[in-house]
Amino acid sequence: MRSEPPSRPQSAHLQRLSIAAAEELRKTVRSTLKELFGNFMPQFIAAVKHAADKALNPTEAQGFQVLTRALNDRRELWIESFVQHIDAHLTGGTLPQRQARGGQTTTNDDSIAVANIELRAEARFHKLVTELDARVNRLRLMLYVPIYTKALAPAGLCRALQDTADELQWPGRNRALLFTKFDEFFIAGLEEGLYRSLIAALTRIGIETAKSAADQDELKVQAAPPRQRKPATSMQAPEDMTHMDSETVSMLQSYALKSDGEGYTDGLLAADLLALAEQRPLPGMAQGQSWIPLQRIALAGHFLNEAIGDTIVPDSMLPEHESMRYPLMKSALTDETLFTAAAAHPLANMINEMLLKSATSRVTGNAETRRIADLLQQVLVQFNLSPEFVRLSMQNAEPIQETQVQRFFELQRQQAQQRRDFVISEARRVVANQLERLTFGRDTPAPAITFLNVAWGPLLTKRLLQHGAGHPLWHAGVTLMEQLLDELDMREPEEVKTTEWQDLTNAMIKALIAEGLSQEKLKIALGSLELSRKTPRNSL
């Protein structure tokens, strides 16, 4: 896997860390492979000797005997050559040919046998190779590490053996024996002999690097720009359906830079997805398949950004809403019905319900509604799928058709409008209840009711929708309304305006102007206030 150069120059500190990390990995690879291949050679020599003993043809027996002696004499050269080929492939280079290949070639039958060995080994060690690659991807988020982990996959190891056999002129007619024993004795020991050792080394290097680089303030993830707040009823499909939005990138970086345990974790999946966004191939995923996960990530991220960016959704619950991003993204990567059957998809419905409860609790101040939103949040987390399952599902994912995408976002627009209509209705109900509560048992003249309905009620509704029931502006508006009703209870129509009345009405008119009340409605409001003051008491 080829590592892309960093987008900005590294500090001298990080450059030293990069060199040290790459060298430590190379040393680990060389030492483990020398031991593993060194254990393989005596078993291979014994197999060749056994073939000589079993051969019925004297010429064939003599040929195997010659090969046995040659292997004994050149055992160390075989080990060194194999390890050097792996090291060259690991760092992206090639070795110069020290000897001519002498026309030794692999037959078609042998090629098929080698391919079968590779396929069996790839299936057997898929999880370990995937984790190994993901840990290198995680390291690349902090450092530029020029390591090609593809060289350590079974296919890469078989290629190195072929290169070694070519260099040391192992006869083509005996390649089948070489690869059969390689499979039996070398491939069989890869889990403990190579992969787990490398994973342990990468885990240790990753932890140490994160701590060291963090000390130099080099790992600060750039904060995403403030989200544009707008009605979600304007929700549209993203223009670029493979572009990973900044909020999703920031979330994935946060996960990937955490040290989160053994095995294939959420952090390693995040590192893989960031590598995918940089167009680096992943083990087990065809090059032409890589854009499909990006499409689904883009759609999920855009959907969530638009939904929680709605002006009716409270900013105070942004952390809770953001916690849905990874579970939603993982569900999108594994289940296309999130987009193709969104009306019936439980996760999409629960997100819609949670946003509705969050927005409603904000305007009503209802603790029970907020509690329900919190419970929904906890249930949503249960949709958090296994990262290993997600990684496997990505390999067989199908693209979402553009017509399906458009239908999905049209449905989201409809649901956003329904949420908005419901929350506006709830805000109006709260304001109406306040008016009813404050006017109950009072001698409130009809012009004052007109003023409250036409001007002050809409102002309170707007403040409630914009700021919520706990905001000082909302409470200030209710207080002014209550003061107005108190003044009207004590009105004396024949007397001149009091200072208190003048200050109160000036404050209310100033607030209405600030809220953008039209001139026509402002005139009605002024007239209603003056008429209400002049209305005789007990005349409703």
Image: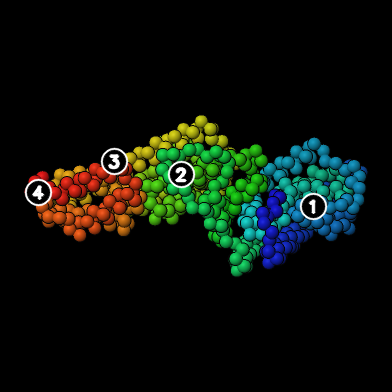
C-beta proximity under 8 Å, tags 3 and 1 = no
The answer to which image quadrant residue 7 occupies is bottom right
In the rendered image, which residue does mark 3 sit on? 520
Residue 536's disc number = 4
Point out residue 65 in the picture as x, y percentages from the top left corner.
Answer: 89, 51
Spatial CA span between label 1 and label 4: 98 Å
Residue 93's disc number = 1
Spatial CA span between label 2 and label 1: 46 Å
Q: Earlier in the sequence, mark 3 or mark 1?
A: 1
C-beta proximity under 8 Å, tags 1 and 4 = no
Instruction: State the residue at coordinates (9%, 48%).
Output: 536
In the rendered image, which residue does mark 2 sit on? 306
The answer to which image quadrant residue 342 occupies is top left
Determine the secondary structure under disc 1: loop
Q: Earlier in the sequence, mark 3 or mark 4?
A: 3
Amino acid on which the number 3 mark rests in the picture: Glu
Amino acid on which the number 1 mark rests in the picture: Gly
